[in-house]
Amino acid sequence: MPLKFKNKLCTGCHLCELVCSASHFGEFAPTRARIRVSNHPLEGKSEVVACFSCLDAPCIAACPQDAISRAGSRQPLFIDPQKCDGCNGDPACVPACPYGAMYFDTVSQYALACDLCGGDPQCVKYCYPGAVSFSNGKPPAAEADLTATISPVEEKKTMAMNNPKSKTMWRRAAKVMPLGVSSNFRYWGDEETLVVERASGAYIWDVDGHRYIDYRLGFGPMILGHAYQAVDDRVRQALGEGVVYALTNQHEIKVAEKLAAMCPCVEMVRFANSGTEATMHALRVARAYTNRDKVIKFEGQYHGMYDYMLFSTYAPPSTFGSRYSPIPIAASSGIPKSIHELVITLPFNDFEALERMLRHTWFDVAAIIVEPIMGNCASIEPLPGWLEFIRSKCTEYGIVMIMDEVKTGFRVARGGAQELYGVEPDLATYAKSMGNGYPIAAFGGKRAIMNLVGRGVAHGGTYASNVVGVAAAEAVLDILEDGKVLDTIAQRGRLLQEGLTSIFKGAGIPLLLTGHPAMFGVNITEEPLTDSRAWAKTDHALYERIMAACVKRGVMPDIDPREPWFLSYSHSEADINQTLNVVEDAIREVKS
């Protein structure tokens, strides 16, 4: 239950410091206060800083005397004066605080941090501009205003978004590109579609200068963060060698070897440029291997932008028919009717439906393709035994199991979902995190199946294994190979999940988080989710309103509740804390 600050209201009067020091020490001495004001005359603003009970409290771990404690997560700190010796004038806790909210009292020779005055903070009473507030009894979120100088959006967070340059540039784009975008999913509306100027780390900036903490990450590929130097440097170095040879290059051999070493099912591999290409080629190989034509896919799963896989993806689940006899729903006009006969759609996680369908059609089925985690439906995870069931049925009926790891690969574990769940498919597909934003993809698997490629099965592409893509993949896999970076990403994802759970609970809004901490869904529901039909019953409208309010304040998850929140290695704990504060403010606005 920390203090809340609205720095745009702070006049820099320092009265809060005087009141704080007088309340604790009986003297008006700002240097002994547990709340501090910093004036920035050149920038025309002031900032208030005090301990806001951050999620991990690094000061606790930093204290060599074990003098700092708290009753629970996000509770005020207690600094035991009997244990704190001030570290001989060089307190370890002060530099450990990333927010500059721990202080050293040179008089008493021990550390200071906000203790909320026993639940009745005096600074709140005496702050006449209203820059300091306190909401007792509500689970708090970390206060983004403490670090307001790092976000150009923060000062505008109570105002509606104002993007005149984006609107002007979108109008130009709309004259020469359908909807003014190069992918339908980037169109948010005539007035709302943003145009981006640049991106770095965990942030993107639009052409109007607004900065956003990015949880879309290009729909997942930026596993390390935007413009990650180690990857970009490797690409710049490789660019001096040329880009496309129409011959094998040394980088692709190294990447192929890494894929075979890191990914459980991969014995041989071929490269492509996108997830769409990878799944398309894998499907062709499966048909050639089995000499069958049909494919089973699961409702709500997306495997690329081509005719065979654009069924029962984004259509309302109410159109899918009975789960006992599902109807494949084409996601686009222009898909030949003859292809409808080759695609079988089923609910995800439905053992009985899959068993029943296979008993009647196994002899026609070349492949079962599955996203192990529903990367396009709130990151719904497989039920225990589900992937194993698919694996056993594919083995039983001579069907090729294709695991689409375009989103999960090199994100949920170094070996992807295969490693996470302990299930090996026959073929797997990769893209996204593999190149940290550079265009690179791959499909690979068992040698007996992959050996058909080039021996009667077509695969090629002018830009397949282009030097830019494989150089990026080489750098990314070098970084991810030992798993430590992915562990850090997951840990920060868990911090975000814990904070969201607390905030939604405090607001009285039901919340169900689904998926892995590195890519998870935020669902407004109390019911368990096992497939897209269940997901369709969640409160999408409320979610969209909350997320729109977050975007307005400089935090950008996707407004579409189907899309996961993606974490990158560049997301810091300070970013997580700021995000939680913004979510709390957004919920407060929506509820009001």
Image (tube, grey):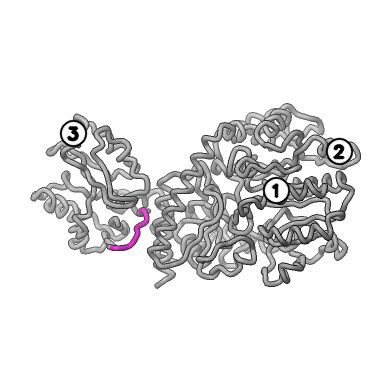
Instruction: Please check the rendered image and state whether residue 144 is part of the magenta-colored stretch, yes or no.
Output: no
Left or right? Give the position of 450 relative to 434: right
How far separated are the C-alphas under marks 3 and 1? 56 Å
Return the residue found at the far right: 456
Whether residue 197 is visible, yes or no, is: no
| Figure label count | 3
Res 97 quadrant in image: top left
Decide which of tag 2 and tag 1 comes sooner along the chain.
1
- Left or right: 396 with respect to 379? right
- Residue 452: image tag: 2
| Residue type, numbered disc 3 | Asp
Name the residue nearer the viewer: 193 or 494.
494
Residue 323's image quarter?
bottom right
Per the rendered image, the range of residues in magenta is 137-142
Q: Residues within 10 Å of mark 3 (few under 14, many from 20)?
A: some
Where disc 2 sits, the SS reads loop
Whether residue 272 is visible to the viewer of this picture, yes or no, is yes
Q: Which type of secondary structure does the marked residue at label 3 adopt?
A: loop
- Viewer-closest of 560 and 511: 511
Q: Callout 2, which amino acid?
A: Leu
- Residue type, label 1: Asp
Residue appearing at x 77%, y 65% in the figure: 328
Query: Looking at the picture, does residue 363 appear above or below residue 138?
Result: above
> The C terminus appears in which quarter of the rendering?
bottom left
Contact check, label 3 and label 1, Cβ < 8 Å: no
| Residue at mark 1 | 404
- Reading the image, the residue beneath label 3 is 85
